[in-house]
């Protein structure tokens, strides 16, 4: 039987349930277990694909094309477990499936209710995900939201039922709560007590508590929490504010013995912990010297989570290159008319050593991105374009090298005489925008003598896509004739997947999203080489 760990949160949101669940996964993998992590999201959207980044941060894409919550990005960065559509369960998916079954008459005329029909659907999806990979030992289920939220009740009830049905040695409840600090530095346990009481009212007695606190809890505080929350003192852990990076959290939990307590409660024999990769990564973090400034030029700068995977991938590249990466967020809207480009991007000795233009949708800020790409190209600043960032390179080349002033993407200008970026043929009649883009893993073939081939070291590349528009094949000849290097294609040669600037330190644009495959213990090769080029520019300044 699979083992299940249900991770819930209380008191308030944004305590770090995703990082906690991911860290537990990393620890159990270090003990030789195969782990799969599932996210249960209470929102009624079927998936995250149609939500604004301002609403829910970035959309993380899996190999099979699921558009999911950004927490799946944490799972991918911390663990090696399979991630697919089955790893993301939403209220929208659950109710949609139950309603379709009701319409098909599969409930034989019975009254369809939250219990048992909705909770049964949730449980069946959790167990189906566990069976998708037969090597799975432990399934970690993160329940989104906060205990007490009306939206989360069906998921918590499903968890209660599974804990009862599987037995407590096969299903555990891990509850994450807040220990706030009040005036005078006193840590208050009452919010945690109330949060656990709310869980108990749902019929769930937490087996393990992880307390989010400003500092490590002392023994007396842990004993008090244990006494009032009906758990053992050894099962009370602290997730305190660390001064390094989030990837130290598994080591913080390991030092407290969280993995040992989980193994004991699940009846799994203790195994030697292999966390060498995590210790090595932290050694590299502490050995970093010098700073590389990377400008992120996009349109969702106000919300850090909008480009979560991009920022993390840059951090991983810094670890690989031995430098600290300092992010400079550049809103491209003020760069639209070109008058402030030099002031904002030039910046003398304080300017960016590298510029990255990430993905995005919509007209706002596009001309500012084009001006940003032009500035990086003309001033020999390392540039990395991802998805929209590659399309921006193509538009810049058409406007400022070929002289087609009106060149544009048909996403932004249907009337342009030079649509150098256009809608994919299969997208032309699409009306339903949910899950209908070019999504998921796809193969690309890198051309000889290109930077993309040098980065990967092999010509066959497998990366994830999320877009509707592509480099227009009509302009291949004129673009390449003017010097733009077409560096990678789909295996059949039908679509351009990468472009590179000639005679430039590092100017690469890719149509796919490499940020989704970067890990702290293994930086993505494109991000690694981009930061390495920026590091060379930084060293040249000194």
Image (cartoon, rainbow, N blue to C red):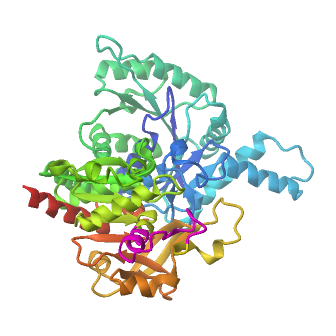
**Residue displayed at 41% across by 42% down:** 20
| The magenta stretch spans residue 541 | no
In the depicted view, which residue is nearer to us: 314 or 284? 314
Against 140, is 320 above or below? below
Q: Where is residue 194 in the image (x, y as percent from the top left)?
A: 52, 19
Q: Position of residue 179 (x, y in %)?
A: 39, 23
Query: Residue most toward the right?
Result: 109
- Specify the quadrant of the image occupied by residue 524: bottom left
Which of 364/8 is in front? 364
Q: Is residue 141 left or right of residue 16?
A: right
**Image x and y of residue 531, in percent:** 24, 61
At x 66%, y 60%, the residue is: 433
Q: Quadrant of residue 362?
A: bottom right
Please indicate whether residue 275 sits to the left or right of residue 224 in the image: left
Q: Quadrant of the N terminus?
A: bottom right
Write down the region rendered in magenta.
393-416
- Residue at x-position 42% and y-position 23%: 226
């Amino acid at each position: 039987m699979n083992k299940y760990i249900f991770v819930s949160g209380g008191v308030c949101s944004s305590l770090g349930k995703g990082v906690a669940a991911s860290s537990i996964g990393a620890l159990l993998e270090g003990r030789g277990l195969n782990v799969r992590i599932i996210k249960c999201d209470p929102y009624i959207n079927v998936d995250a694909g149609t939500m604004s980044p301002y609403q829910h941060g970035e959309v993380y894409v899996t190999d099979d094309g699921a558009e999911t919550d950004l927490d799946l990005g944490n799972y991918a960065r911390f663990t090696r477990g399979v991630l697919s559509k089955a790893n993301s369960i939403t209220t929208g998916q659950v109710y949609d499936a139950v309603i379709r079954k009701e319409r098909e008459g599969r409930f034989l005329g019975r009254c369809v209710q939250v219990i048992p029909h909705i909770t049964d659907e949730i449980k069946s999806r959790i167990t189906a995900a566990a069976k998708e990979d037969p090597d799975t030992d432990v399934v970690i289920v993160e329940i989104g939201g906060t205990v007490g939220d009306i939206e989360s009740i069906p998921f918590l009830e499903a968890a209660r039922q599974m804990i009862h049905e599987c037995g407590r040695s096969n299903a555990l409840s891990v509850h994450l709560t807040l220990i706030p600090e009040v005036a005078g530095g006193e840590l208050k346990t009452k919010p945690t007590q109330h949060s656990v009481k709310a869980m108990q009212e749902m019929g769930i007695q937490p087996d393990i508590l992880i307390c989010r606190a400003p500092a490590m809890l002392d023994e007396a505080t842990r004993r008090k929490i244990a006494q009032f929350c009906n758990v053992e003192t050894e099962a009370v852990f602290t997730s305190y504010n660390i001064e390094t990076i989030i990837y130290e959290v598994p080591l913080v939990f390991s030092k407290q013995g969280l993995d040992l307590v989980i193994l004991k409660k699940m009846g799994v024999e203790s195994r030697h912990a292999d966390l060498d990769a995590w210790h090595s990564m932290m050694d590299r973090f502490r050995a970093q010297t010098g700073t590389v400034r990377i400008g992120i030029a996009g349109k969702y700068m106000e919300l850090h989570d909008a480009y979560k995977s991009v920022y993390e991938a840059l951090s991983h590249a810094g670890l690989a290159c031995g430098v600290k990466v300092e992010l400079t967020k550049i809103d491209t809207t003020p760069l639209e008319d070109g008058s402030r480009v030099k002031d904002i991007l030039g910046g003398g000795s304080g300017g960016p050593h590298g510029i990255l233009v990430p993905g995005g949708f919509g007209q706002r800020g596009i001309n500012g991105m084009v001006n940003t790409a032009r500035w990086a190209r003309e001033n020999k600043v390392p540039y990395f374009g991802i998805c929209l960032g590659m399309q921006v390179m193509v538009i810049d080349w058409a406007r400022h090298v070929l002289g087609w002033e009106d060149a544009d993407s048909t996403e932004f200008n249907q009337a342009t005489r030079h649509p150098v970026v256009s809608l994919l043929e299969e997208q032309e009649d699409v009306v339903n925008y949910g899950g209908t883009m070019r999504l998921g893993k796809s193969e690309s073939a890198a051309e000889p003598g290109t930077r993309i081939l040098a980065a990967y070291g092999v010509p066959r590349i497998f990366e994830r896509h999320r877009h509707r528009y592509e480099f227009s094949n009509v302009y291949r000849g004129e673009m390449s004739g003017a010097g733009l290097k077409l560096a990678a294609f789909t295996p059949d040669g039908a679509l351009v997947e990468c472009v590179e600037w000639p005679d430039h330190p590092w100017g690469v644009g890719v149509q796919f999203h490499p940020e989704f495959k970067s890990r702290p213990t293994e930086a993505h090769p494109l991000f690694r080489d981009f930061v390495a080029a920026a590091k060379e520019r930084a060293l040249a300044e000194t």
